[in-house]
Amino acid sequence: MKNIIVLGLGSGTLDQMPIGIYRTIKQAKQLYFRTACHPVVDELGAEGVQYNSFDEVYEAHQQFAEVYEDICERLLSMAEREPVVYGVPGHPLVAEKTVQLLLEKGPQRGIGIEVIGGQSFLDAVFT
């Protein structure tokens, strides 16, 4: 099945990540992060987790809208060939334009989008 699993990396360290998200990351064959600039990504790299990031896409475009469209298109194209796991900082449904675009465009292309939440920066405010 064509699909993308979107994971929230949370707003802190690996110790705060739900075990289900951690297991999904460890089992992923195609793992992408919107950015490698996150404490969890550093820790996963230290554990030997192989991943790619889209940091170079930010440098290739002048506007954030272009960046997010490009990332979305790349993920959808990859998912047409094999399942993809995509991690974003915080919670995927809080201020994540790439996730909104995937939720809009994925079904139009026959690609399932599964969202698995992570802690958002807002959780720290309310707890």
Image: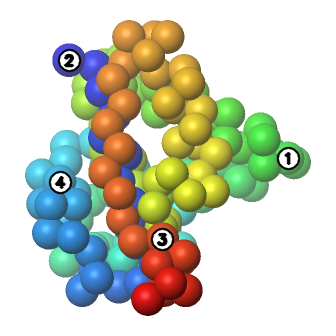
Distance between mark 2 and mark 3 Cα atoms: 29 Å
* Residue receiving disc 1: 63
The amino acid type of the residue labelled 4 equals Thr
Let me know if residue 17 appears in the view.
yes
Distance between mark 4 and mark 1 Cα atoms: 32 Å
Residue pictured at 33% horizontal, 23% vertical: 112
Task: State the residue in front, 116 or 110.
Answer: 116
Comes first in the chain, label 4 or label 1: 4
Comes first in the chain, label 3 or label 4: 4
Q: Which of marks 4 and 1 is in front?
A: 4
Distance between mark 2 and mark 4 Cα atoms: 17 Å
**Residue 87 at what x, y percent from top left?**
40, 55
Look at the numbered discs 2 and 3 and tell me whether their residues touch, using CB distance below 8 Å. no
The amino acid type of the residue labelled 3 equals Ser
- Quadrant occupied by the C terminus: bottom left
- Quadrant occupied by the N terminus: top left
* Residue receiving disc 4: 24
Q: Is residue 67 left or right of residue 85?
A: right
**Residue 71 at what x, y percent from top left?**
58, 39
Residue pictured at 27% horizontal, 74% vertical: 17
Secondary-structure class at tag 4? helix
The amino acid type of the residue labelled 1 equals Gln
* Residue receiving disc 2: 1
* Residue receiving disc 3: 120
**Residue 103 at what x, y percent from top left?**
50, 30
Q: Which of the 4 quarters of the picture holds residue 68?
A: top right
Task: State the residue in front, 2 or 119.
Answer: 119
